Amino acid sequence: MIKHIDHIGIAVKNLDTALSTYKQMYGLEAAKIEILNDIRVRIAFIPLGEVLIELLQPTEPGAGRIGQFLEERGEGIHHIAFRVDDIQETLKVLKKMNIPLRDQEPRDGGNGSRIAFIDPRASQNVLTELVERKQEVEEYRKWTLEN
C-alpha cells in the first residue's frame, strides 16, 4: 500500500524568502513552482534524495487551509505525504478499516498528482497525505505557472 515518503509539507508565509533560505543554508533549489488556484496555494517542490520538501504559501494571507494553518500555528511542518501506487484502492482499504478521512475521494494535487488526506486523529495528530504520481517532479528544472 505505502511505497515510501513522498514529501514533507511545510507551510511558509513567503515562498520566495523560504526558497532563498533553503538555497543559502542547504544548497537546495526548487525543481518546480506552481500555483493551485482551487486550493489557493503556491507550491515549490525541492528534491532531497528520494523525498521532496514541499513549501506551501497561501496565495493571499489567511486563504485556504494553509492560510488558516499559518494564522493559527505559524510557519512549520504541515503534513507528511506517503506515496501510493493506487490512491483509489488505498482509500477503499482505509474506509473498510473505518479510518477517518478528510478526503473521501482523490483530488488533484501538485505536479499532476492525485491526493487525499487522512484525518490527523487517525495517526497521532499528524496530518497525513496520500499521493499517487503519474510522473516525477522534474529535478532541477524551475517552472512557474502564474495566473
Image: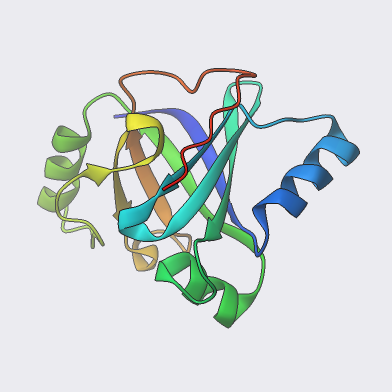
x%, y% of residue 51?
Answer: 58, 29
Tell me where residue 20 appears, x and y as whole percent: 80, 44
20, 52: nearer the viewer: 20
Residue at 46 percent across and 56 percent down: it is 41
- Apparent side of residue 117 relative to residue 65 in the rendered image (left or right): left
| Residue found at x 65% / y 32% | 30
Quarter in which the N terminus is drawn: top left
Q: Nearer the viewer, residue 4 or 108?
A: 108
**x, y (%) of residue 129?**
38, 48
In front of the other: 103 or 19: 19
Residue 134 percent coordinates (x, y): 30, 20
Compared with 140, 88 (above or below) is below
In the rendered view, does 110 fall on the left or right side of 43? left
Q: Quadrant of residue 91?
A: top left
- Residue 52 figure quarter: top right
Seen in the picture, residue 51 relative to 63 is either above or below; the reply is above
Q: Residue at x 30, y 56 (%)?
A: 38
